[in-house]
Structures are given as C-alpha cells and as structure tokens.
Image (spheres, coloured by chain):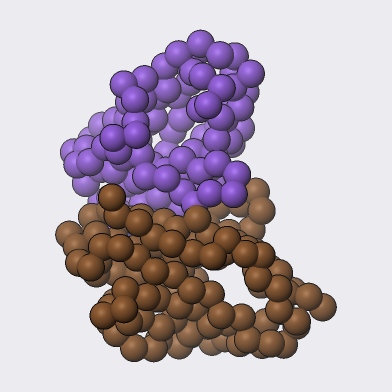
Chain colours: A brown, B purple
C-alpha cells in the first residue's frame, strides 16, 4: 500500500515567520511531488511541484526533495494570515499515473 | 479556458437513491481523475481515465460506483443505491500528462440522508 504521511497539525506560526511543512512517502519509485493548498470548503489548488532532488523556489515558497530519505518539504517564508489553510502533499507512483495524497497539515498563521 | 467544471455543486439525496455527477476537464487535458474527500482527510483516489479508457479503479470502489468518459471529453460518476457513508466531497481533476500537476474542479458535495 503506497502511503503519504504528514503531521495533521495544527501548525501555528506567527505572522512573518517561516512555516515548515513535511511529508514522507513509502513508494521509493515515486517520481513527481506536489504541494496543494486547500481552504476550508474549497478544492485543492496547486502551489508547487518538484521532480528532482534539491530545492525549488517560487516566490515565498520553497519545495525541498530528498529521494534517498523519501522526504519532501514546503517552506513558506514571511507567512501571512492568508496562508492559513490545509496543505496537502501528493506523490505520483513510479509510472507517473496515480496521485496519492497525504492527509494534509493544517497551518494557522497568527496575526 | 475556464478550468475544470463540476456539476452539481451540491447534491442532497435520500439513502437508496442513485446520483450522477458530471465533470468537464480542461479541454487539452488527456487525463481525468475522480477523488473523494471527507472532512479532515486528504483526497482519496477513486479512478482515472486516459482519454476514454479507464486505466485504474481503486479497490475501495464498490460495484455501486461507476464512471465513464465517453469520447474522452467529459466524465460522469454514478453512485447507485447511495448509503450514508457515501456522503463526501467528490473531486474531479485533470492533467495534460501522467506526471503533470492535477487541476481540480470545485467539487460536488454529496449529502445522503
């Protein structure tokens, strides 16, 4: 059974701080990794994706991938109250055909 | 391009009734996925299509669930003899290729009373 694990939270950070969200996955053959943000009652929206080991930066967001440790993370710099949401980690299988989602981490940015 | 469209947005039905949901993917996307999400959980995979072919179906999906994608365009998800445990948000997503990001519709929230 392919699994994606995340701490459910809530993770609380003060406004302006760095929020660090973590995800581990069980399928060593996984190829592609995605972070989605989901506001309450809304559908997931894509934040970032990463395919290769290392860091990928996009504005205030940085995704980090370590395939050897089967670990992917998302850093949010200068956190804003509007970043308060559930963050979902998704991983494809080694054929790139199916997306498995973690349970999500609830982030709360305190003004 | 208006994104992935799902209808209806909300559906309330009585236990034992059949319901059908529709999803219109982004036009150039070949792949179409159905997920189910309950409160506090991540999206749970149900099935996906490559064009009109249904390539994988979750073992969690009972025979009361069926999905189609005629002509590789829109898709429908039907649930027969609904049960209270079917109450959830049903999400449709599409992608251009297998490892391209998924783009989600707004979802259909099903309530079975």
Seen in the picture, residue A79 relative to A30 is either above or below; the reply is: below
Residue drawn at x 29%, y 54% as measured from the top left: A2
> Looking at the image, which is closer to me, A28 or B112?
A28
Image coordinates of residue A45 in percent, x first then y, are 52, 61
Using the rendered view, name the quadrant where residue A108 is placed.
bottom right
Using the rendered view, name the quadrant where residue B49 is placed.
top left
Image coordinates of residue B101 in percent, x first then y, are 36, 64
Seen in the picture, residue A107 relative to B27 is either above or below; the reply is: below
Seen in the picture, residue B62 relative to B57 is either above or below; the reply is: above
Q: Tell me the quadrant of the picture where the C terminus of chain A can be found.
A: bottom right
Count of marks overlaid on the render:
0
- The answer to whether A8 appears left or right of A53 in the picture is right
> Looking at the image, which is closer to me, A93 or A3?
A3
Q: Residue furthest right?
A: A111
- Residue B24 seen in this snapshot: no
Using the rendered view, name the quadrant where residue A18 is placed.
bottom right
- The answer to whether B13 appears left or right of A95 in the picture is right
Image coordinates of residue A100 in percent, x first then y, are 36, 55
Residue drawn at x 45%, y 13% as measured from the top left: B81
- The answer to whether A99 appears left or right of B110 in the picture is left
Residue drawn at x 59%, y 14% as measured from the top left: B14
Image coordinates of residue B4 in percent, x first then y, are 45, 49
Residue drawn at x 41%, y 83% as measured from the top left: A64
> Looking at the image, which is closer to me, B85 or A69?
A69
- Residue A11 seen in this snapshot: yes
- The answer to whether A88 appears left or right of A85 in the picture is left
């Amino acid at each position: 059974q392919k699994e994606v694990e995340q701490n459910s939270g809530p993770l609380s950070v003060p406004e302006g701080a760095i929020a660090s969200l973590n995800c581990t996955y069980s399928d060593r053959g996984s190829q592609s990794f995605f972070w989605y943000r989901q506001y309450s009652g809304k559908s997931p929206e894509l934040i970032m994706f990463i395919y290769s080991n290392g860091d990928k930066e996009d504005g205030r967001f940085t995704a980090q991938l370590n395939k050897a440790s089967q670990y992917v993370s998302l850093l949010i710099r200068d956190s804003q109250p509007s970043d308060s949401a559930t963050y979902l980690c998704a991983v494809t299988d080694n054929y790139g055909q199916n997306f498995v989602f973690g349970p999500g981490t609830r982030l709360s940015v305190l003004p | 391009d208006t994104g992935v469209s799902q209808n209806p947005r909300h559906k309330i039905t009585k236990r034992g009734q059949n319901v059908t949901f529709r999803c219109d993917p982004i036009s150039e996307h070949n792949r179409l996925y159905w997920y189910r999400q309950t409160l506090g959980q991540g999206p749970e995979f149900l099935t996906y299509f490559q064009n009109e072919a249904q390539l994988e179906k979750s073992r969690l999906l009972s025979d009361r669930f069926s999905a189609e994608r005629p002509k590789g365009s829109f898709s429908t998800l039907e649930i027969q003899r609904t049960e209270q445990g079917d109450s959830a948000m049903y999400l449709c997503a599409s992608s251009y290729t297998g490892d391209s990001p998924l783009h989600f519709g707004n979802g259909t929230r099903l309530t079975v009373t």
